[in-house]
Amino acid sequence: MSEPKRLFFALEIPPAIQQQVMQWRAAQFDPQAGRPVAAANLHLTLAFLGEISEQKQQTLMTLAGRIQQPAFTLTLDDAGHWPRSQVVWLGCRKPPRGLLQLANLLRAQAARSGCYQSPQPFHPHVTLLRNAANTVSIPAPGFHWAFPVTEFVLYASQFSQGRTHYQPLARWSLV
Ligand code: 2AM
């Protein structure tokens, strides 16, 4: 039996959008604003699962495979700062219904399978900076990235040599 893994379901940010977001971030925030998340680590979490055994992972993957939902368009056009978690994020002014449905379903499946689920309502966001300074100022609206979401991904979060790496373990199409 292998060690439990720290797992979460999330949406990938397409590489072309990652690059545009990185350029925008570099132009908008000075280096003291916070610790930038690496381009490859930009993602939008749908359901955080915590430390999960291999057996429970199999159950969650079977349940995820039963999800039948259409693809949707995600528009990142909002940003904010959560001082408590010291996070600066990108989000959606009006989250699409498909995103909320997918997250609710995955969170319900996880809760029924006995995984920890945050008591907080779902706040869809892409973390841009960690350890953000209290004084960080958030860019005015006017930015806008839109892309089709045609799949969701199960990731394992790994921390080694001072770096966090998110390894995709499985992916499912939205039809
Ligand atoms: P964050 O970016 O806002 O920190 C991998 O760590 C992903 O899971 C990140 O998107 C992180 O959100 C989220 N995450 C980590 N711990 C969590 C928790 N206890 N509840 C909800 N989401 C969590």
Image (tube, rainbow, N blue to C red):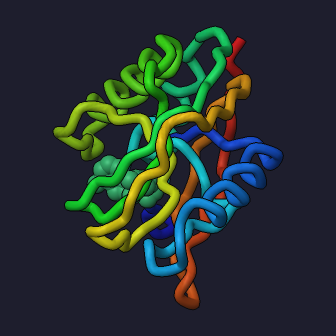
Query: In this picture, is 147 found above or below 23?
Result: above
Q: How many marks?
A: 0
Residue 88: x %, y % from top left? 41, 57
Instruction: In the displayed orientation, state which residue is furthest to the right.
Output: 16
Q: On screen, 148 above or below 125?
A: above
- Residue with the most extreme bottom position: 161
User: For ligand 1, which image quadrant applies?
Assistant: bottom left
Front in this rendered view, residue 44 or 174: 44
Quarter of the image with the C terminus in it: top right
The residue depicted at 53 percent of the width and 66 percent of the height is 29
Whether residue 149 sits left or right of residue 109 in the image: it is right
Task: Name the residue at 59% across, 11% down.
Answer: 69
Residue in the foreground of this view, choosing between 95 and 171: 95
Q: Is residue 172 above or below residue 161?
A: above
Q: Is residue 48 at all visible to an observer of this figure? A: yes
Image-quadrant location for residue 104 = top left
Q: Residue at x 32, y 32 (%)?
A: 122
x and y percentages locating residue 121 in the rendered image: 24, 32
Q: Position of residue 48 (x, y in %)?
A: 38, 46
Residue 53 in sight in this render: no
- The spot of residue 30 in percent (x, y) is 53, 73
Q: Nearer the viewer, residue 75 or 124?
A: 75
